[in-house]
Image: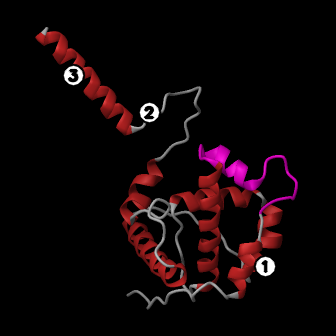
Amino acid sequence: MRKAVFPAPAAPDHPVWLALRRYTIGPDGAALDFTGRLARENGWSRGHAERVLDEYRRFAFLAATAGHPVTPSDAVDQAWHLHLTYSRDYWDRFCPLLGRPLHHGPTAGGSAEEHRFFAQYADTLRAYEAAFGPPPADLWPPAARRLRDDPRARRVHPRDGLVVPWPAVWLLSLAACLTLGWRLLA
């Protein structure tokens, strides 16, 4: 039986949220700052990485205040993974700001874990909406995409493969079919 889940408090004036809004990750003056590294490692624009970092701050607020386990979106999880590599910053500055340690625990697998993470993700989205309003759909996708599709993603180095977005594949296929059809008719 699931425990009752309560949403996180509204964020605007909460001391943890105020501290998170001012918090920066990593050393000042680094040639490649956290946001730049996040963008580079994920193939994102700097603007997209900045949005993800903002969502990571919101996730951290929920983790500290929601009163129940929370599950990040895949993009937010990428920021969390990278932040963990800044270990001194993470444990010495970030967790004290939250008022508690924030451990990252991967799934143990299996159907029970899948149900648990689906429930946690739904609880996270409810808490997010209570604290911040509706989450951006491009960074907080539906649970099935987050928990079934996104984990299948793999990093591909550009020298090792060609990554072509599906819309381009469809357009190229359509163009090839039309060209072939035109030649057959001619």
Image quadrant for the N terminus? bottom left
The range drawn in magenta is: 25-45
- Label 3 sits on residue: 178
Residue 162 at what x, y percent from top left? 49, 28
Give the residue drawn at x 67%, y 88%.
Answer: 13
Q: Label 1, secondary structure: give it.
A: helix
Dot 3 amino acid type: Leu
Left or right side of 119 for 56: right
Badge 3 crowding class, 10 Å Cα cut-off, few under 14, some 14 to 19, many 20 or more, is few
Q: In which quarter of the image is residue 50?
A: bottom right
- Label 1 sits on residue: 96
Looking at marks 3 and 2 on the same chain, the residue that comes earlier in the sequence is marked by 2
Badge 2 crowding class, 10 Å Cα cut-off, few under 14, some 14 to 19, many 20 or more, is few
Residue 182 can be seen, yes or no: yes
**In the depicted structure, whether residue 36 falls above or below residue 186:** below
Give the residue drawn at x 59%, y 67%.
Answer: 55
Residue 109 at what x, y percent from top left? 45, 61
Dot 2 amino acid type: Val
CB under 8 Å between discs 3 and 2: no
- Label 2 sits on residue: 164
Give the residue drawn at x 46%, y 75%.
Answer: 134
- Marks 2 and 1, Cα distance to the nearest angstrom? 43 Å
**Mark 3 or 2, closer to the camera:** 3
Q: Label 2, secondary structure: give it.
A: loop
Looking at marks 2 and 1 on the same chain, the residue that comes earlier in the sequence is marked by 1
Q: Label 3, secondary structure: give it.
A: helix
Whether 34 is among the magenta residues is yes
Looking at marks 1 and 3 on the same chain, the residue that comes earlier in the sequence is marked by 1
Q: Quadrant of residue 176?
A: top left
Dot 1 amino acid type: Pro
**In the depicted structure, whether residue 177 falls above or below residue 14:** above
